[in-house]
Image (cartoon, grey):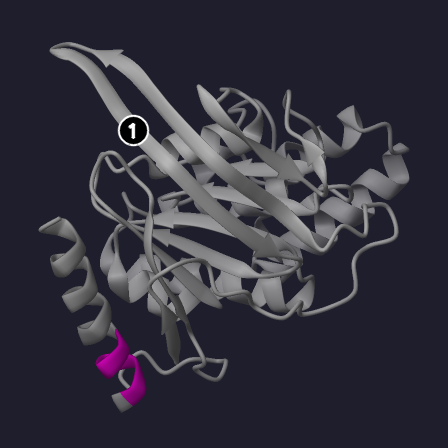
Amino acid sequence: MSSNESGPLLAAPAAAAPSNVSCAPFVIEASGVSHAYEGQTGWVHALENFEIKIARNEFLCLLGPSGCGKSSFLRMVTGLMKPLEGEIKLNGTRIEKPGLDRGIVFQEPALFPWLTALRNVAFGLEMSGMDREAVDERAAEVLRIVGLESAMHLYPYQLSGGMRHRVAVARAWALPDASLLLMDEPFSAIDAVNRMTLQKYLVDAWLAEPRTVIYVTHDIDEAVYLADRIAIMTPSPGRVGSTVQVDLERPRDRNSDAATKLRAELTGTMHRLGKH
């Protein structure tokens, strides 16, 4: 494990870039990003001079307290919101609008209740113009990766909460042109045992098909289990206060001495940054 207090520490790419994406050195480059919005009691400064670079196929966790601008940054990367200052580039091009080159998983699965698990996963693929046979093959393949092969023909009401979240992950992962996956605390509403199971399926999917992942969380244990690198944010207005490279071998043992030590160090860092 190594850390850097002054700026992002870059992880080496896990695999070569897919042929359909740019060969820019970083998938995401955020520079000088500031954002504010009007709240009930006045203007809220969500981000101030936020900067980060994220390498291809890196699994990055944005870790920080509620209200530090994590979700605001994620919405900017989706193209649903623009910063007041600065810019964010995706594969070397400034982000101006949403696109199929980004898959998104929110806190709620947001599945179509009238579609089966297979057809929910297939929906985005169909919108991308793939033919029906290729769509069904791809959707079934990703559902197998997340352990839902036997449930692909069930409707959302027939699935447990954890299974619905796995369908949501599969739907985002299935997009062939999505070089980047954005995940906004997708498992925060799940109980602890099922949350650990979902985290394992997510890592399995990432190992099977490496993608760049930005995962927003306020859970230190989750960040240690998932991330290649953890960017710790300061309280509002948010910026990257510290970065930590996670050198723990995969599959990870949550109870190992190294994991326990890292959790303690991250807790100390978050407390220190929270006093600024």
Considering the whole magenta stretch, tell me its main secondary structure.
helix
Identify the magenta region.
Answer: 258-262
Q: Looking at the picture, how far across and down is residue 62, in whole percent?
A: 38, 51
Q: Judge the density around disc 1: few (<14), some (14-19), many (≥20) Cα neighbours within 10 Å.
A: many
Examine the rendered structure and indicate whether residue 45 appears above or below residue 144: above
Q: Looking at the picture, how far across and down is residue 219, in whole percent?
A: 26, 56
Residue 27 vs residue 213, the one in the foreground: 27
Q: Is residue 92 visible?
A: yes
Q: Secondary structure at mark 1?
A: strand
User: Residue visible at 27% across and 66% down?
Assistant: 221
Left or right of residue 36, residue 119 in this image = right
Q: Which residue has dot 1 on it?
A: 46
User: Residue visible at 66% across and 49% down?
Assistant: 27
Does the stretch in magenta take in 260? yes
Instruction: Name the residue type under label 1.
Output: Ala
Q: Is residue 157 visible?
A: no
Q: Looking at the picture, how far across and down is residue 117, in whole percent?
A: 59, 39
Examine the rendered structure and indicate whether residue 212 appears above or below residue 71: below
